[in-house]
Image (tube, grey):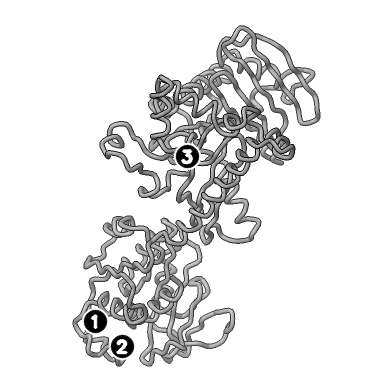
Amino acid sequence: MKILVINAGSSSLKYQLIDMDNEQMLAKGNCEKIGLEMGIFGHKTADGREKKIEIRMANHTEAFEQVKNALLDSEVGVIKDLSEVAAIGHRIVQGGALFSESVLVDEKVIEGIESLIPLAPLHNSAHVQGIRACMSVFGKEVPEVVVFDTAFHSTMPQKAYMFAVPYEYYEKYKIRRYGFHGTSHRYVSHRVAELMGKDIKDLKLITCHIGNGASVTAVLDGKSYDTSMGFSPLDGLVMGTRCGAIDASAITFIGAKEGMSYAELDEMMNKRSGVQGMTDLSSDMRDIDKAYNEGNPHAIVARDMYYNRVKKFVGAYAAEMICRAGVGRMTIVDADTVQPTNINRQLPALHSTLGQKKAEILASRFRDINPALELRVLPVFLKDENIPELLDDAAYDFVVDAIDTLAPKCHLIAESMKRHIKIVSSMGAGAKSDISQVRFADIWDTYHCGLSKAVRKRLQKMGIKRKLPVVFSTEQADPNAVLLTDDEMNKKSTCGTVSYMPAVFGCYLAEYVIKRL
């Protein structure tokens, strides 16, 4: 399968044709100065054949004609027929809040990209021109997909993407942080996890896209949690020609002193600042490095600022991910009470809790372990339909499942997994519960426990088969129970059955979780 990848700019069009069977680039090129009196078209194949000509390209459609002709050319071509191009992919800078993932192009998608032109006038306008021109040249029967720079960052929490300006501007104009370079940050973070041999959902990563345009992203559990670029690609790091983060009052002061318009100030910050503006030498770090080594004082300050800004964001994001839920905060949800029918199976210390909410019992245990813990108890009757709302209410680090009703238990597990929230589930407690006898395992490695078997069966029906840590007491005498763990592989062990009270055993889960906060 051959895929044509397009990056259309306001006056340029870059492309690569990639053979996805071996992920090898077959040819690449660039159409420059589109719309000007004379343009430049360059094309190069993987085996070194080249074509470079000066030719007028009045619009993107004429540029795509050059791309098509080069791909089919008898001397520098790499395909014999356009039908060999199975699909076309477009990189789109601004997807706003409309697009959180890559989508197949249709008229509605094009209209959506057009509606976001005010947020990225040069980029999105050019992207729309590129898509329509591509359809005109290659035909509407070739599937086209758009990939958004901003989509990876759509998972940022509101506290990361909002600006502290009057809320009405967010409502009127969608003024917020969007983030950019998302395709790069997504690839790098997933590749790092692959090289580490770890599940990205278990990692806290910081990725750096360093170039003429540059950004840093905090990647938590495989999702963008915060990023240095904001409403536009101007914010954040010091870049080649962009100033990065700056006190807005300094800009309004310059504008007043110099008599500059908003458009002129925007042009100054985007095209005449960064290391270029500080040194008046170049926007290329190779030139800045050379001047630095030669002792140029402006180059020394510019490079030191460039490096220092990267370090500041890396340090800030490390702290942000470690402390994301607030130090010592936890929410407990459970509406059930301890029942008299199960009293003989509960810890002796809990006998006086008859009739109390299980959540209150757990909260008391948590406070005993950590008196400084800030606890919130939600008196919610847990039903399938309110679980998503409950989980979206806050940024949870852990969910402790101490539910003994099968349906809400499974839905809580499934919805937590969808949100990549770490969840530990209790499956039973014996009559002589003892913390030294607690066993943790993956639910897919447990057998002969009535509740775990029922949960496993439901999760399979939901299409879920990811790791799920579960906890058992090994005191209850069940001769047929087998719990496979690293240190007790295939040995006879004991674990609770469906009739036992997981919520009481949640007290042990409290210790497990608290010690890992």
Given the image, on which type of amino acid does mark 1 rest? Val
Query: Which image quadrant is residue 38 in?
Result: top right
Tell me, for residue 346, which label it has, or none.
2
Camera-near label (1 vs 3) is 3
Element marked by disc 1:
loop
Q: Residue at x 40, y 23 (%)?
A: 262
Q: Residue furthest left?
A: 355
Q: Residue at x 62, y 51 (%)?
A: 191
> Does the image show residue 86?
no
Looking at the rendered structure, the kind of residue marked 2 is: Gln
Q: Is disc 3 placed on a helix, strand or loop? A: loop
Amino acid type for the residue under numbered disc 3: Ala
Q: Is residue 511 left or right of residue 3?
A: left
Q: Give the vertical position of 256 relative to 250 (above or below).
A: above
Identify the image quadrant of the C terminus: bottom left
Other-residue count near label 1 (Cα within 10 Å), few / some / many at <14 / 14–19 / ≥20: many
CA–CA distance in space, label 2 to label 3: 58 Å
Q: Residue at x 50, y 19 (%)?
A: 129
Callout 2: SS: loop
Q: Locate residue 349 relative to residue 20 in the image: left or right.
A: left
Numbered circle sitting on residue 338:
1
Q: Residues within 10 Å of mark 2 (few under 14, many from 20)?
A: many
Q: Is label 2 in contact with label 3 (beta carbons under 8 Å)?
A: no
Q: Nearer the viewer, mark 2 or mark 3?
A: 3
